Each structure stands twice: as C-alpha cells, then as structure tokens.
Amino acid sequence: MASFVRDCLFCLLPSLLLLLLSLTLRWPRARCWTRLAVKAAGWRLWVIICLILELPLDRNTRTWTKEAGSPDTDVLSGSGQASDGPKLICKPTALANYLLRHCGSLVRPRLASWPRGDPHLQILSSMLCGQQGDTLQFTRDHLLLRDGGIVALDWAVGTRLVEAAGRKRWDGRKEHQSGGKALGCFTTTPPVLLVIPQSWGGMTPHLKVLCHQAVRQGFYVVVFHARGTAGCPLTTARLTEFGDPIDLEQVVAFVHSRHPSSVLVAVSEGSGSGILLSYLGESGSSSHLTAAAAISPVLLGQLWFETAMPPIYHWGVLLHRKLQLSRYASSFRGVLDVDRALRCSSLRDFEETLFCSSAQLQHKDPRPPISSLNSGLSSGSHSPQGLAPSVAWALGDRAYPANNWDSYWERNEPLRDADEVAVPVLCICSQDDPLLPPASTLPVSLFQSNPYFLLVLTDRGGHCGFALENREEIGGERTGNKEAEDGNWSLIVVLEYFRVVADFLKGEERDGASRSGLLGEYIQAGQRSRTNNTAPPRRRRAPMMRRPRPQAPEESSADAEEGNFTWKRSYTR
C-alpha cells in the first residue's frame, strides 16, 4: 500500500509542480522577477550569438532593463546628449515650430526595448516579417526613358472592401491625432506618395506596411524601381549610379503629368535616399515635390562605402548586387569584365569596378564602365560618340565614366547640392543603426544652418526599424488600436509629417503674399524655373554643405528671438 501511494505521488509530482508554479506566478512580484530573469538569460545568450556573428552590440543594458517612459522631444543644436526621446536637430524656423506643435507622433514615441528593440532583430523582422493578411496589391507600369532604358513603377491598388474598412478605421483615429484630417483624405485629388526602396532594389515588408498605411490614409502610392532591379528588365548596358537622379527626374515628371492636381511627396528607405537627395539638389526650386522624407538615409555616400559594415550585412548586400549583375552577365561581357566584378570582395571595389574607368584600366584588357554605355555604343568607346545627340545631351557629364573614385563622388554625393534644395526634407536616423556609419559622422551643421533639412535622431531603432513598444510590455492597458501600439514609429511620423507640412503650406497660402512664407516663394520659384526652362543645364559643383549666411537686413530682431526664419532663397534656375 505504501509503495502504491509513493508511486501515485511520483506520478502527480509534475502536475503539482506546475500548479505550484502557476500559483506563484499569480503573485505580481514573482511574475516581475521571472520576467527579469528570462530577459537576463536571453540577453546573455544574445551576446554570445552576436560575438559569434561579429555583430556590434549595444552594451547599454538600460535598453532592456528600463521600462519605457514618456520621453519628450528636444530641439537641439547638436549637443549629442543622451535622451530616451527623439531629438529634433534643425534650424529654428516657423516650419520647425509648427511641426513641434502639431506633429504629435514626434513627442510621444514609445520605442521598443530589448528584445524587440534590438537593432539586429529589427532589421531581421523588417526584412522577413511583413504585415499579416496584407491584401494590398500592385499593378506595374514600365516607363521608357530618354536613353532607351526602362524603369518600373508599381501602383498600389486594393479592393473596395479593404479601402472602405481602412477609411472607417482611420476616421475613428483622426480625432486623437494632432488636429485635422490626413493629407488627402476625403478629397477629390488625393496626394501621391512616391516610395523609393534601397539602392539594390526590392520591396521589403517594411515598405509594404508603409504603402498599406498610406493607402488607408488616402494616398495614391507608387513605388519606383530602378532599371535592372525588382524584376524590371534591363534594356541598356547602363546601370544607375548611386546618386544619379536622371531616371528619378523623369519618373517624377511622369507621375506629375498623370496627377497634375495632386500634391506629390516622396519617401526613401536606406540607401535609396542617395538618388532622392541628389534629385532635390539638382532640381532645386523646379522640383514637383512638395515635401520629402528619408528613413535611415545614407547622407554621405562615399563614407558609407568606405566604412566597414558588419560582415553578415556586408556579404548579404554584396551577394545581392552580384546576383543582379550575373543575371545579365552574358550581355555585359562585351563591355565589362564581369568576372573581375564578381570576384570583388567589398562593396567599394564592386562599385568602383562598375563605374570608374581607373578600375577598368588596371586590367590588361580595359573595357569601358557600363555607366558610359548603352545598347548603341561599341565596346571600346569611352565617349558619348555613337549616342544619339538627344541622349548625349540628356546624360550630360554622365555620358562619360568617372575617372576615379573621388571624381565618381564629386557627381554622386547625395548632399553635393544641398544649397539648392527647396522643399522640406525630414531625415529619421538612429544612433544604433548597424548599417550606417556612426551617428557622430552625421552632418549636423547642415541641419543647423539649412532651414529645409530636419533631422530626427533617436537612441534606438536600428536600420528602418523603429518598432513601438506594445502596452502589455510596459504594463499598460491596450486601447484596441493594435496598429498604433505595435506599429512602426518612423512610418507614423513620416505620414503625419506630410500632413502637417501640407497644413503649414495651406496656412501660409491663406496668410497671403504679404507674409514672407514658404508656399508663396515655392510657387514663385516654380514659375521662374519653368519660364527659364530653355536655359542650358549648369555644371554640378563639388560636394559641399550649406554655408552659414549672414542675417538678412530685413530680418527683424524679433523674428530672430522667436526663432522664425524668413523663407527667402536665391533663384538659380
């Protein structure tokens, strides 16, 4: 009998232990200790994995031990002080002050802590984990360019049921957002959002979520795919250089012609900011864009190529680029040493081999870089001879290959014409971004002196991550709005930023021409540029940032004290 009882106790022991554990976890303090112990064990395991994969670690353990608070947004002058909230680095202007007052997502973020807030896990989730049950579909247009190349434009479309449900949900949310309707909602001319992916092409789940939210808020959404990427056919032996905006310029003109009455805004992801910033600088006040935003942008292209990237990311990007080239290897063998390019062990060598003549001349059988050729060029030509005159004129200096690595960046550095940018540009960066150079290399002086550039800098967020903390993790109660709680903060900020800028411009328009505002000068600048569109294209300058200029005589001391900027700029087009 005793043995039978002992056997029964042994059989029931696991169940009793589970019951005791469940009762213990009902005690709030025990539940808190258990959660901290699991986090600590997971953190140590993650440290080991990162050391094996040679991934940089954020060793500041407060990112996972400190509970999320209610951070505030600071308007900084580049002090670089640590803060849980985002830091808005910009020249104090009327637009910046308007953003701080009306862009609620800037001042109330709850960025996720570890593990969801880990930069590497955010990159992995943004690349692999998309929106569940996404019903958004795309229809593709192929745009024939002046040089015979083709780029792809994917227009976001959806069923009427999905759009109606999205508008209904947004209508319930718009009350708690900082005033007004979303840009274009319930209007006859919705705005157009131009999305520019990474320079190596492809739609990440992160961008699909952006497109989905934009469609729900009433935007027309179109995604730009460069030639030879994302299934776009390559019809010429010419790839797009990192900061070459010629193709994007034609795309913007085409989209504007299809929706001439709509506001046109653009957002780029990561390295896709190279052509967006270059376009804004080269087009100046003649740009059709009203506002632009860049999420985790590459602001200094040459530094990005020359800075060592974590090996796992470096080899992943390089492999993707090589696969794109190998797809057209047989077509390129007559104009490029494909084997030499495929043997490159770094992104810099790969880029230099494709686009710089100095790298080609190192080979015993030199061939011209593909940037200088199209399907009508002979394999031995280093000049635009053989090109149609209209094509050679359209390409300009880019009909010739860059002589060397430095001259390549003289014409492709994204901020080479920062002085000419004439539309507001919001850049969202994170200090723990493992794919970009350190935050200490950011051109802070540009944002402090140029009124059209605004930088939002966060302590964490990774590369195009910026995941929001959910209410369960911070001990709060859910509101039922899962998108607002568990969404991507950068996407929310970007879409709200476009709405606030549109409201600001409308307010400037209502105030009339007597007030020196951005909208009136924007319209005047566009009219001046269009009346002088027969002028020959001017040569691009060497890379430069905006230089501080003395205060205008007509700017009153009261305006300076209030931090208002008189929106005046020199017209060069």
Image: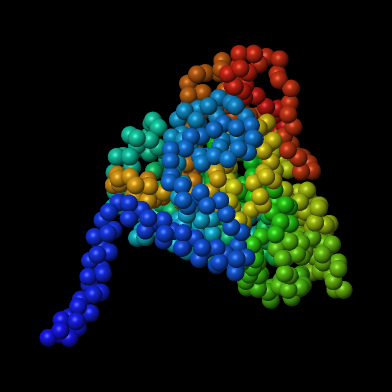
Question: Which quadrant holds residue 80?
Answer: top right
The residue under the point 69% across, 35% down is 445
Is residue 219 found left or right of 538 in the rendered image? left
Residue 254 lies, in percent from the top left, at 56, 47
Q: Is residue 101 above or below residue 140?
A: above
In which quadrant will I find the C terminus? top right
Image height of 404 relative to 508, above or below: below
User: In this orientation, which residue lies closer to the viewer: 402 or 87?
Assistant: 87
Residue shown at 68%/74% (left/top)?
A: 329
- Asked whether 11 or 515 is in front, the reply is 11
Q: Is residue 441 visible in this depiction of the protein? A: yes
Task: Name the outermost residue toward the left.
Answer: 1
Q: Nearer the viewer, residue 480 or 232?
A: 480
Relative side of 25 to 312, left or right: left
Residue 512 image point, x, y percent: 52, 18
Pick out the residue farthest to the front: 2
Quarter holding the N terminus? Answer: bottom left
Task: Residue 543: give x, y in percent of width and height.
Answer: 76, 43
Say which of 405 and 137 sits in front: 405
Q: Is any part of residue 152 visible from this angle?
A: no
Q: Tell whether 33 sits left or right of 266.
A: left
